[in-house]
Amino acid sequence: MNLNEMLNRIYETIYSYEVQDIPLQVVDFFNELIEKQAININDIYQVQTYNRLMKNSLEAMQNMDYLLLADILEYELKPIFGLGNKN
């Protein structure tokens, strides 16, 4: 499954309010970003951005604010890591 498919699955889970599945999907997605080398681990800016987005995503899940989580993924993460229709 590519990164965009994983994101779409997270969105579907959020909007169908299957909250029990969201944390694992988000963790899998962030792990996949590293495994597929979507971020350059030698670029301090990308690593800091990755860490900030992961922290914000975890906080949104802890607060059960799944719409905020969807917004973080859509409007912050996708543009920064170049995700879109190409993956």
Image: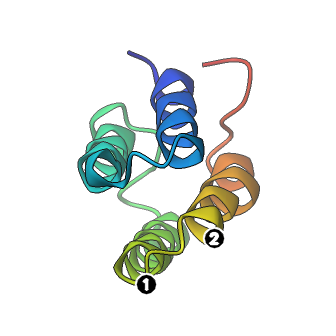
Question: Is residue 72 found left or right of 22 in the rendered image?
Answer: right
The one nearer the camera, 69 or 35, is: 69
Kind of residue at badge 2: Leu
Q: Nearer the viewer, residue 16 or 69?
A: 16
Instruction: Look at mark 2 in the image and give the residue it sits on.
Output: 68
Q: Position of residue 70 (x, y in %)?
A: 62, 56
Residue at left offset 52%, top offset 64%: 46
Question: Residue at left 48%, top 49%?
Answer: 17
Give the image location of residue 69, x and y in percent. 56, 64
Classify mark 2: helix, strand or loop.
Answer: helix
Of the residues shown, which amino acid type is indicated by label 1?
Asn
SS for dot 1: loop
Say whether marks 2 and 1 touch (CB < 8 Å): yes
The structure residue drawn at horizontal position 70% and vertical position 51%, both measured from the top left corner, is 74
- Which residue reaches farthest front? 17
Callout count: 2
- Count residues near mark 1 (Cα–Cα under 10 Å), then give few for <14, some for 14-19, many for 20+: few
Which disc number belongs to residue 63?
Answer: 1
Q: Is residue 33 above or below residue 8?
A: below
Q: CA distance from mark 2 to mark 1?
A: 10 Å
- Residue 82 vertical placement versus 74 (above, below): above
Q: Residue at x 38, y 37 (%)?
A: 37
Q: How is the image coloured?
A: rainbow
Quadrant for the N terminus, please: top left
Q: Nearer the viewer, residue 9 or 79?
A: 9
Which percent across, then down, holds residue 47? 42, 68
